[in-house]
Amino acid sequence: MTPSVVDQPTDELYKSGMAFTLNLKPEVEQRLKELAEAEHRSMHKTVEVAVQAYLDRHDRDEWTRQAARRVFEEDAEFFEMLGDR
C-alpha cells in the first residue's frame, strides 16, 4: 500500500501537490465545516484525510478482489466439486 499523503508534513504537501477548486452543495459544505471544527482541522485537511481514506479503501478492495480471483483459479476443481453436491 502506498504511504499516506496525509501523514506528510504540510510544507512538503504544498511543494508537489495539486490545487483545484472543490464545489460542494451548501449542506455538504456545512457538514464538512462542522466535522472539521469538531476534529480541530481545517476543511482542506479534512477533505484530504477523506480522499486518502477513499483511496486506501479502494486499494484494499482491489487487493481482496485479486486474492479471491487467485483462490478461485487455484482451487477451481475443489469449488466445482462443492457445486456438484
Image (spheres, rainbow, N blue to C red):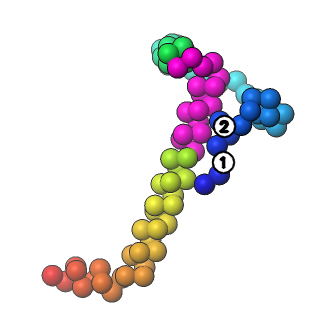
Q: Where is residue 8 shown, x and y percent of the image?
A: 71, 37
Q: Secondary structure beneath disc 1? A: loop
Residue 50 part of the magenta segment: yes
Instruction: Give neighbour class at mark 2: few <14, some 14-19, many 20+ (Cα, 10 Å).
Output: few
Q: Quadrant of residue 12?
A: top right
75 left or right, relative to 49: left
Could you tell me which residue is drawn at 42 percent across and 82 percent down? Answer: 74
Q: Where is residue 2 shown, x and y percent of the image?
A: 65, 51
20 left or right, relative to 72: right
Could you tell me which residue is drawn at 57 percent across and 17 percent down? Answer: 40
Could you tell me which residue is drawn at 59 percent across and 32 percent down? Answer: 49
**Residue type indicated by callout 2:** Asp
Q: Quadrant of residue 17?
A: top right
Position of the N terminus by quadrant: bottom right
Q: Can you tell which mark lies on residue 33? A: none
**Residue ID for mark 1:** 3
The magenta-colored residue range is 39-55
Position of the C terminus by quadrant: bottom left
